[in-house]
Image (spheres, rainbow, N blue to C red):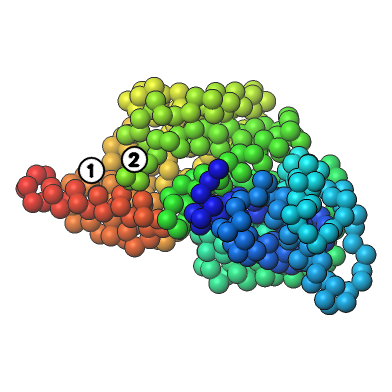
């Protein structure tokens, strides 16, 4: 049993429970604001009661039950007597939580809540909304990411993202968008946006855009869970296979990405014995199955790149020629400065740092606010012996660092430059 006095554990539990709890509350109340407010009230009561009373047997059930009661109490206080939809997760509401918690937990169907999360993703990705608003709303409502985190995922300012989300919420409220489970045709139409949402959720977990933790494992796990559920709905969709494979192969390296002091360990320096073989095997099988269908797409190509890394027993065994080829194909189907930046790493391995720098430098305007642009540019300049320029690039990266681990990694690079200058080595 966790130490319930540990507020970090409570915060992590509330964060992990959010998608399923909000989705279940939305199914009951059919109003986004009510569902979110109910969950927030349940969180406040958890912070009040859990430290003194001990953890509930099922935190998710507790939060749903308390949130639902709180929202109904608010409805009664406002003297609103609108009928609410029947809900088969419980047989009624009573005021005494302790007397009914055990019975409620027995009746909760966890599979239903998993379906609720997917249903809410498809609801948020309604074609009534512009695509960017669909994804932003889903990341905010379903995944619980902050406006700052979503803005960084889209490489836009926080105020602009706040406006997108506000417009999306108003559109949902005024357009009468139904909260029923979409049919097969509607799911087909919205699948691409849902996949993008899951992908961005994973990215926030893989390399957090802020906070104390560089890796947010719970978000990675949730994204993989959702990808698997989507794959169960669309078992023959190669891009969905590619998405699931990509997440699994990337997350397989989780235990090797930070050292004991929380410092970033670059891919080429990672202890590959720490990579998760089960995730790698599952990911490789999905990549193979997807590519057999000969309908390549961006997720499949990214997964194939991750698979090439995963199949190298040592960093020296990496097939950089294949990775460069795959990035070139990805540039063709989904041109992006970030894709070109990533390709530059392969180019540096094949043709040297100067060739890679020639790819990177033209990206300066598009990626001026992107941490990894300045980090890679600094690394290439350092390899070329251009210490002052490398120092300037690393200084820009340090200013953009989102986590302590990123900042520590850049400081280590700056320390190496200083040590080299002090010894007179070129």
- Residue plotted at (88% across, 77% down): 79
- Residue plotted at (45% across, 34% down): 253
How far apart are labels 1 and 2 at the CA level?
24 Å
Residue 178 in the image: above or below residue 59? below
Question: x%, y% of residue 218?
Answer: 55, 45
Q: Secondary structure at mark 2?
A: loop
Question: x%, y% of residue 109?
Answer: 78, 41
Q: How many marks?
A: 2
In-front residue for pair 397/113:
113
Residue that protrudes farthest toward the bottom in the picture? 78
Question: x%, y% of residue 306?
Answer: 49, 33
Q: Residue 348, located in which quarter of the rendered image?
A: top left
Q: Residues within 10 Å of mark 2 (few under 14, many from 20)?
A: few
In-front residue for pair 368/77:
77
Residue 224 in sight in this render: yes
Is 4 on the left or on the right of 367, as rendered?
A: right
Tag 2 residue: 259
Q: Residues within 10 Å of mark 1 (few under 14, many from 20)?
A: some
Is 174 on the left or on the right of 239, as rendered?
A: right
Question: x%, y% of residue 390?
Answer: 24, 53
Image quadrant for the N terminus?
Answer: top right
Is 2 on the left or on the right of 103, as rendered?
A: left
Q: Earlier in the sequence, mark 1 or mark 2?
A: 2
Judged by depth in the image, the label closer to the viewer, 1 or 2, is: 2
The disc at residue 383 is 1
Residue 43 in the image: above or below residue 358? below
- Residue plotted at (51% across, 55% down): 5
């Amino acid at each position: 049993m966790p130490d319930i006095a540990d507020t970090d554990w409570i915060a992590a539990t509330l964060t992990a429970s959010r998608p399923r709890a909000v989705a279940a509350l939305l199914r009951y109340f059919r109003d986004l604001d009510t569902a979110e407010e109910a969950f927030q009230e349940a969180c406040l009561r958890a912070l009040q009661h859990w430290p003194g009373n001990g953890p509930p047997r099922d935190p998710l059930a507790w939060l749903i039950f308390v949130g639902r009661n709180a929202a109904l109490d608010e409805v009664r206080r406002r003297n609103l007597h609108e009928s609410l939809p029947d809900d088969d997760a419980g047989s009624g509401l009573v005021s005494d939580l302790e007397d009914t918690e055990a019975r409620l937990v027995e009746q909760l169907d966890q599979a239903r809540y998993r379906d609720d999360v997917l249903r809410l993703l498809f609801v948020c990705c309604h074609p009534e909304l512009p695509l960017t608003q669909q994804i932003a709303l889903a990341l905010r409502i379903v995944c619980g990411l902050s406006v700052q985190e979503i803005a960084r995922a889209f490489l836009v300012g926080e105020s602009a993202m706040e406006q997108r989300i506000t417009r999306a919420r108003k559109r949902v409220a005024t357009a009468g968008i139904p909260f029923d489970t979409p049919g097969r045709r509607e799911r087909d139409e919205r699948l691409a946006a849902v996949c993008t949402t899951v992908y961005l959720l994973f990215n926030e977990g893989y390399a957090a855009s802020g906070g104390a933790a560089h890796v947010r494992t719970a978000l990675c796990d949730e994204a993989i869970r959702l990808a698997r559920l989507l794959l169960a709905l669309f078992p023959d969709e190669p891009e969905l296979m590619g998405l699931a494979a990509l997440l699994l192969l990337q997350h397989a390296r989780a235990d090797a990405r930070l050292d004991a002091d929380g410092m970033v360990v670059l891919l080429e320096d990672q202890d590959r014995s720490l990579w998760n073989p089960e995730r790698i095997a599952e990911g490789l099988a999905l990549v193979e199955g997807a590519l057999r269908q000969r309908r390549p797409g961006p997720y499949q190509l990214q997964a194939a790149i991750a698979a090439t890394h995963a199949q190298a027993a040592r960093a020296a065994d990496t097939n950089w020629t294949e990775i460069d080829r795959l990035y070139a194909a990805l540039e063709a189907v989904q041109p992006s400065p970030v894709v070109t930046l990533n390709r530059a790493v392969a180019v540096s391995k094949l043709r040297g740092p100067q060739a890679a720098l020639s790819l990177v430098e033209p990206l300066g305007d598009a990626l001026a606010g992107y941490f990894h642009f300045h980090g890679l540019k600094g690394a290439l300049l350092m390899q070329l012996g251009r210490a002052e320029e490398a120092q300037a690039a690393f200084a820009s990266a340090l200013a953009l660092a989102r986590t302590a681990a990123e900042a520590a990694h850049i400081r280590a690079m700056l320390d190496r430059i200083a040590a080299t200058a002090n010894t007179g080595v070129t």
